[in-house]
Image: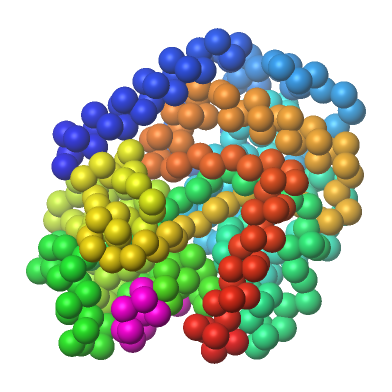
Amino acid sequence: MKMKRILAVALSACMALTMLASCGNNGKQPNSGNNSNTSANNSTQQPGSASTPKTIDWPKQGISIICPFKAGGGMDLSTRLTAKYLEKYLGVTVTVNNVEGGNSWTGWTQVAQAKGDGYTLGFANYPAQVAGYLNPSAGIPFTYKDFASIANVVSDPNILVVSANHSDIQTAQEFIEYAKNNSIVLGTGGGAGCDDDVTIAKINDQLGLSIESGRNASTAESKAAMLGGHIAGVIANVSEYYGLVDSTGDDAIRILCIFSDKRNDFLPDVPTWTECGYDEIIGGSDRGLIGPANLDPDVKALLIDTLKQIEQDPDFQADAVTQGMSIGMKYGDDFEAFIADTEATMTEMKPLFGW
């Protein structure tokens, strides 16, 4: 798997760089690490340059992006990737602020209640945000309409993962047969209604199983439980386990399938759920930039224009490949329409969660 994966990722990167070479970017190598911010002065890209000129006198100060998850998971990495390139193009410091608690709603509430000047933004993931307020026991007073939908950035498919050290299971089919005869728990990277939890509910509904969702507090928590042999496996996202594909020792894993309509370039040897012989299940985390509902329309427009430039930046594309992160840009009204469709789907699924 290792050689095929390296070739596939290299091919993806080369294709992206070839297609984007004419976009007028500076070809600078991406900064290493996952710091909360990166120095905009290290880039030759000037604020408001490239295809769309800066038309308003904004920003005048640093920007904070609230990520309502712990550092290190897929949401945090997606937020930091976006912050890094907003900083490069806007010319001000862009800081990621991890605000945990309340099944992510502590952070999202701060975004909803922020001033509309654009200096406090947030990152949201779907279906988790929608599920949070559809759960009647949560008592969330907000919906997606209480936020400005700026742009979806990442679409990160779900995968089924087991520990290579604590599980003899080699295929998704073997896993399902095991689940038919045993009470098992699958770890997740969030609570009720997160993308991992939704995929488990879909599996149970499709196959008449009773797999328990771990509804863990974080990706790190479920990963530790799986690698330690305390749970049968995890439903997670590609980017969260991409770095462990070739690991040995205590971190060795086995990815059994992916919940996508096609194989993933980062994991070319991993079959889809449908290829394993089951009816299609599509599952994953879509993550994007949001603001308060009263966000200044001119600021929102400038952010969208900036993110469109970022999408074409070869350095951004290369950083996404390094992290095993699939870019899935949706802007403005298209992003909001996607969220509305997600809400409709989750409303239909409420009985599966006892809502």
Segment tinted magenta in the rendering: 203-215
Question: Which image quarter holds the N terminus?
Answer: top left
Q: Residue furthest left?
A: 168
161 vs 120: above or below: below
Residue 297 among magenta residues: no
62 vs 215: above or below: above
Question: Between 218 and 149, which is closer to the camera in this rendering?
Answer: 149
Question: Which image quarter holds the C terminus?
Answer: bottom right
Task: Tell whether 240 sits left or right of 291.
Answer: left
Kindly tell me whether residue 236 is visible in this rendering: no
Task: Tell whether 285 sits left or right of 292.
Answer: left
Question: Between 350 and 226, which is closer to the camera in this rendering?
Answer: 350
Q: Residue at x 56, y 23 (%)?
A: 313
Image quarter of residue 163: bottom left
Q: Residue at x 10, y 69 (%)?
A: 168
Its colouring scheme is rainbow
Task: Tell whether 76 sits left or right of 283.
Answer: right
Residue 43: give x, y in percent of width and height: 61, 19
Kindly tell me whether residue 21 is visible in this rendering: yes
Q: Residue at x 66, y 77 (%)?
A: 134
Residue 155: give x, y in percent of width and height: 50, 48
341 vs 203: above or below: above
Residue 284: give x, y in percent of width and height: 46, 58
Question: Between 349 and 183, which is closer to the camera in this rendering?
Answer: 349
Q: Residue at x 20, y 58 (%)?
A: 254
